[in-house]
Amino acid sequence: MRAGESGVTLDAMSAKRFNIAVSDEGGVDFAKVVAHCRKAGLKVERQMEELGAITGTADADHVEKIRSLPGVLSVEEDRDVGAI
């Protein structure tokens, strides 16, 4: 077990990497969305405000909570892409 940045304990075996799309509509504060994602259990790795994207790791049990946050458009599990 290891402690996540947000204070949430993540089991290395159940934590997965996710890509979160953030709304660019007026009134959405990107920094607040990042903070809410952390509170919901996401260990934020990258914040790309210009792209409206956050990447990080979280236990799969936290995904629905992250999806329900204001300003979050989608949460997708990161996938490896390889060459043929």
Image: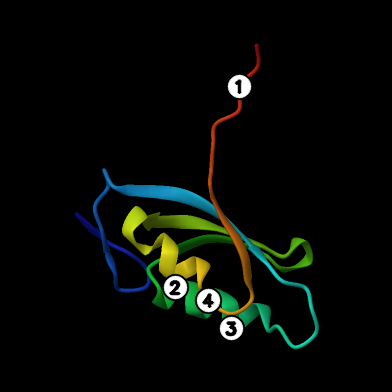
Q: Is residue 59 left or right of residue 19?
A: left
Mark 1: amino acid: Gly
Q: Which residue is mark 1?
A: 82
- Residue 21, compared with residue 31, is above or below; it is above
Labels 4 & 3 near each other (Cβ < 8 A): no
Q: Nearer the viewer, mark 4 or mark 2?
A: 4
Q: For the residue labelled by badge 2, is the local secondary structure a helix, a strand or a loop? A: helix
Residue visible at 79% across and 78% down?
25
- How many residues crowd around disc 1 within 10 Å: few (fewer than 14), some, or many (20 or more)? few
Q: Is residue 38 left or right of residue 52?
A: left
- Residue 84, compared with residue 74, is above or below; it is above
Badge 1 or badge 2: first in the primary sequence: 2
- Residue 54, compared with residue 76, is above or below; it is below
Q: Which residue is mark 4?
A: 69
- How many residues crowd around disc 2 within 10 Å: few (fewer than 14), some, or many (20 or more)? many
Badge 2 or badge 3: first in the primary sequence: 3
